[in-house]
Amino acid sequence: MKVIAGSLDKMLASAEHLKQVGRNDLRRGDRMLVFTRNSCYSLLVLEDNSFLVSGGWFDRHRLSPVETTVAGCSWGGSVIKVDIVAACGLSLEFGNRLVTSAIQKIVIFRHSCLN
């Protein structure tokens, strides 16, 4: 995918209007379900920007649960937004270089400690 500066600016501007979950929106213990066009992934937020991931490709390859990182979200090419973990319409890119189909829905379950 060849991206020129003008189209890159348009892509980044369009991302601001998507339903998205930023890295700073998540806390340790939060769980996120990410429904893509082809699969569903469960991501449990761990420490140090890592996640315990199950579902989708990881289940099909009998790797679930696996601890990995999220590189960010992309439009399916080489342009990636590293400040977001998931955004509807974009593809989720895991640290193992796995790229999902387009995200359709995101559900967040907040971790809460009862004292």
Image (cartoon, rainbow, N blue to C red):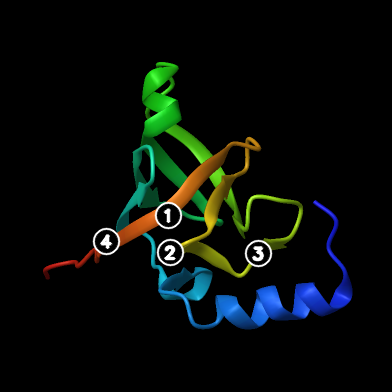
For label 1, count other residues whose C-alpha is less than 10 Å away and answer few (under 14), some (14-19) or many (20+).
Answer: many
Residue occupied by mark 2 = 88
Q: Earlier in the sequence, mark 4 or mark 2?
A: 2
Quadrant that contains the C terminus:
bottom left
Query: Which one is earlier in the sequence, the residue at label 3 or at label 1?
Result: 3
Q: Which residue is mark 1?
A: 103
Residue under label 3, please give it: 82
The secondary element bearing badge 1 is classed as strand
Q: Taking the image as drawn, is residue 30 in sight?
A: no
Residue depth check, mark 3 versus mark 1: number of the one nearer the observer:
1
Q: Nearer the viewer, residue 27 or 10?
A: 10
Q: Give the x, y percent position of residue 6.
A: 83, 79
Q: Is residue 19 left or right of residue 69?
A: left
Q: Could you tell me if the residues under marks 4 and 2 are in contact, i.e. CB atoms within 8 Å? A: no
Name the amino acid, label 2: Cys
Q: Nearer the viewer, mark 2 or mark 3?
A: 2
Quarter-wise, where is residue 74 in the image?
Answer: bottom right
Pinpoint residue 32: horizontal percent, then vertical percent.
Answer: 32, 56
Q: Indicate the secondary structure of the residue bearing disc 3.
A: loop
Q: Which residue is mark 4?
A: 107
**Distance between mark 2 and mark 3 Cα atoms:** 15 Å
Viewer-closest of 102 and 40:
102
Q: Position of residue 107 (x, y in %)?
A: 26, 61
Q: Is residue 36 visible?
A: yes
Q: Label 4: how many residues lie within 10 Å, few (<14), some (14-19) or many (20+)?
A: few
Instruction: Give the spatial CA distance, label 1 vs label 4.
Output: 11 Å
Determine whether the residue tagged by mark 4 lies in a helix, strand or loop.
strand
Disc 2 residue crowd, few under 14, some 14–19, many 20+, Cα 10 Å = many
